[in-house]
Image: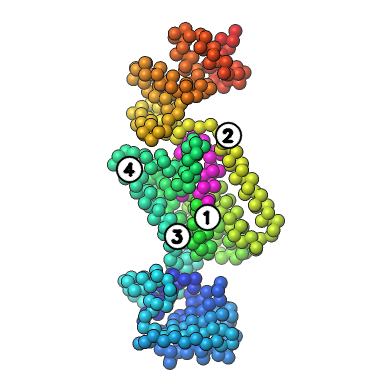
Amino acid sequence: MNKWKIAYEVLRHSKYSYHAFDKSGDVIWLINNKDKLVMGISGALRETYNVTDQVSGRLTDFSRFIGFKPTEIKMIYPSPSEEKSKETIDGVKVVEHLTNQPEKILKSLFYRFNYKYKPDKEDKVYQKRVSSKHPLESYMLKFTPVTSVLLTLNLIVFLIASLSIYFNQSYFLVNILSVSHYEVVSGEIYRLLTSSFLHISIEHFLFNMFALYIIGKFVEVIYGKITLMITYILTGILSSMFSLMFISEGIMLGASGSIYGLLGLLVAHMIIHKHIDVKRVIQLAVIITVLSVFTHFSSNINHFAHFSGLIYGIIFGIFIYFRKVNLKIVFLVIVVFIVSVILNIVFISSHDSVPAFDTLAAEYIEQEQYEEALDIINEGLRHGNESYQTYASLAILAEVTGDYNKRDEFLQKSFELNPTNEQIAKEKIIMLRRDSEHDEIRTILSRFDIDNIEDKGLEIIAREYDE
C-alpha cells in the first residue's frame, strides 16, 4: 500500500489538508479544520503503531499536535484483509480501518477511479506534492470539477467558433452569442451570459483560461462548487449589463468579467476573515498585475466589465459571509446592489444602437475596405440582423460601384426604418432635391426642431427651407 499516493488522492478529492509526517510511526497526518476531522495514513501495520495508544489519556497532547480538539480520528493501516473498528475515547470517535483496498477509503467516485486506474508515480513525487507548504500548491493540488467544467465549456465554444471562422469565414457563433446593445435591448437577454464563454483570439482565450484555472481552483476550494458556478454566471451577466451602460456600439465577449468576479470573492474572503496570508496575497497580486498588464497592451479591452465584475464579486462575498459582517454594512451593500441593477436597466433602455455587424461594416467603409464591409453586411443579413444602418451602408457601397439606382433604393429603405435619423434624413433630402420634391422635403424637415439639429448639413438645409 503506497501511503503517499493515498494521501495525495485523499487531499485531491476531500477537504483534508496536509499537517505533518511522523517518521517514527511512519504516519502521514491529514486534517480537516472546518469539520474537526483527522486522518492518519500509516505505512506500518497496526501492531507497530496503534492510534488508540496515542489518544487514550493523551488527548490534550494530541490536540496540541494537530492544532484543535478533533471530533473524529480515522486511521488507515495496510493489511492483507479488510477490517474496521470504532470506539469513542474521551469524547472523540476513533475509527481504525485495516485495508488491502485503499481505493475504497473515500466514497468519491473520482478518488476511486484515479487511485485504481491512474498510472503510479514515484513515491518522492507524491511526497513532494503532499508535503508542500506552498499556499498555491495546496490549492492547485485539489480536484475541482466545476472549474474543469467551465474550462471545458469555454474550450468547446472557442473551437467551434474558430473552426467556423477558419473554414467557412462565418461569424455565426460570434454573432449569436456575443453581447451587443441592440440585440440585448431587442430581447436577446441570453447574450449577457453566453458571451462569458466566447473568445475571439487564441491569445485572448489562453490568457483568460490560465486566470480561470488558478482563480477558479482557489474559489472552488474555499467557497465550494455551487458558489463558484453561481458567481461565474451572475458576475458575467452583471458585468455585461454594466458595460452596456457605456458601450452601445459593437460587440463584447470574453470570460474576464466572470473571472474578475471570482477574484472579488477571494478579496472579500481575505478581508472579512482578516486572515491575510502574505504568500497568498502576493500570488493574487501577481495575478492581478498580469491581468492588468495584459489588458493594458491589448486593444478593445472592456475595462468596464473588469471593474464591475470585481465589485460584484466582493458584494457576493459579503452576502455569503453576512453573519461575519456588520449589519449596517450588509444593508448598505444590498442597497448599492439593488440600485446598481436598476440603474443598469434604465440606462441600457435609454440608449439607441444598431446591430453590432452594422457598426463593424461602417468601420470597414470608413477605412475604404469595401469588400470586407460587404461580407460583414451579408453575414448579418443571413441571420436576420438588419437596421437602417445596414441599408445606409449598402447605399454607400452601391454609390462606390456607380450603381445609383441601387443607392437610392437602399437609402429609401434606410429612411423608412428610421426617418428621424439626421444623417439618413439629410441624404434622403439631397436625393429628393435632385427631383425638386420640395413638399416632401418640407414634410421630412417638419419632424425636426431646427434649434436642436446636430448634423450641420441638415441644419443648413432646414434653415434654408425655413426662410
Q: Position of residue 211 (x, y in %)?
A: 45, 55
Name the kind of residue labelled 4 in the image: Ser
Question: What residue is drawn where x is 39% and y is 55%?
Answer: 152
The crowding category of the residue bearing disc 1, from other C-alpha atoms within 10 Å (few below 14, some 14 to 19, many at least 20), is many
Q: Earlier in the sequence, mark 2 or mark 4?
A: 4
Q: Residue tagged by mark 3? A: 146
Hey, what amino acid is under mark 3? Val
| Mark sitting on residue 231 | 1
**Residue 185 magenta-highlighted:** no
The answer to whether mark 3 and mark 2 are in CB contact below 8 A is: no
Q: Is residue 242 magenta?
A: yes
Amino acid type of the residue tagged 1 in the rendering: Thr
Q: Amino acid at mark 2?
A: Ser
Q: In the shown orientation, is residue 399 left or right of residue 35?
A: left
> What is the distance, in whole Å, between disc 3 and disc 1 at their CAs?
12 Å
Q: How is the image coloured?
A: rainbow
Q: What residue does disc 2 label? A: 350
Residue 413 appears in view: yes
Q: Which residues are magenta?
A: 234-255
Q: Secondary structure at mark 4?
A: helix
Depth order, front residue of 197/383 = 383
Q: Mark 4 = which residue?
A: 164
